[in-house]
Amino acid sequence: MSEQSATTPGEGESVQDRELRETLGTALGTAQEHLQQNGGFLPFAVTLSDDDELRIVLVTPGEPDEHGDIDAGGMLADIQELLLQGRAEFKAVAVVSDVYLPDHGSDGIHGAAEHRDGEVRAAIIPYSPTADGFEFSAMEPDTHEPSIWVD
């Protein structure tokens, strides 16, 4: 691949950067929409296929425990397994989940994206409930280790 084809003319952004930004942005935006419409969301992923199609990957939650809680960690593990199995068909993936942010004293949307060429990008969006739904704070960068294309 030549240097010319790896960069978007005039922007200096690599194709991988653009694909990661698009995949992560779609995942975070979808999580915000689900939160506003439904008051919450379960973990899910967004994939970018070789034909540049964005697709949502969902898994069915297990039965709630005696307190009515869903095992989100188990769902994330199931999503991870599906992404590992299908990674040959993806250019990029992003996984989002609802997390508690102790430094903010609020909940947040955590998103982590990986590109098959090795780049990783992650972000959090703190949020808090309001009378009209939810108020979202500015997106902040976060750290993440690769987990899909690791071997």
Image (cartoon, helix red, strand yellow):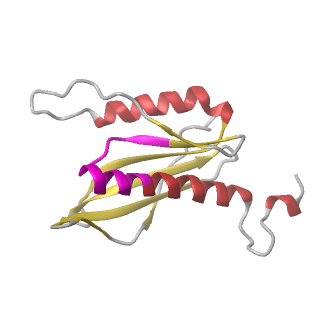
**Range of residues picked out in magenta:** 30-45
| Closer-to-camera residue (11/140) | 11
Q: Residue 24: x percent and y percent?
A: 52, 54
Q: Residue at point 26% right, 32% down?
A: 71
Q: Residue at point 37% right, 55% down?
A: 33
Q: Residue furthest left?
A: 67
| Closer-to-camera residue (143/11) | 11
The quarter of the image holding the C terminus is top right
- Does 113 sit above or below residue 130? above
Q: Residue 118: x percent and y percent?
A: 66, 48
Q: Is residue 1 left or right of residue 132?
A: right
Q: Residue at point 56% right, 30% down?
A: 84
Q: Is residue 24 left or right of residue 35?
A: right
- Does the magenta-highlighted stretch encompass residue 44? yes
Q: Residue furthest bottom?
A: 10
Q: Residue 46: x percent and y percent?
A: 52, 44
- Does the magenta-highlighted stretch encompass residue 82? no
Q: Residue at point 88% right, 63% down?
A: 4
Q: Residue 139: x percent and y percent?
A: 42, 68
Q: How many marks?
A: 0
Locate residue 124: give its quadrant: bottom left
- Does 65 sit above or below residue 98? above
Q: Is residue 6 left or right of residue 67?
A: right
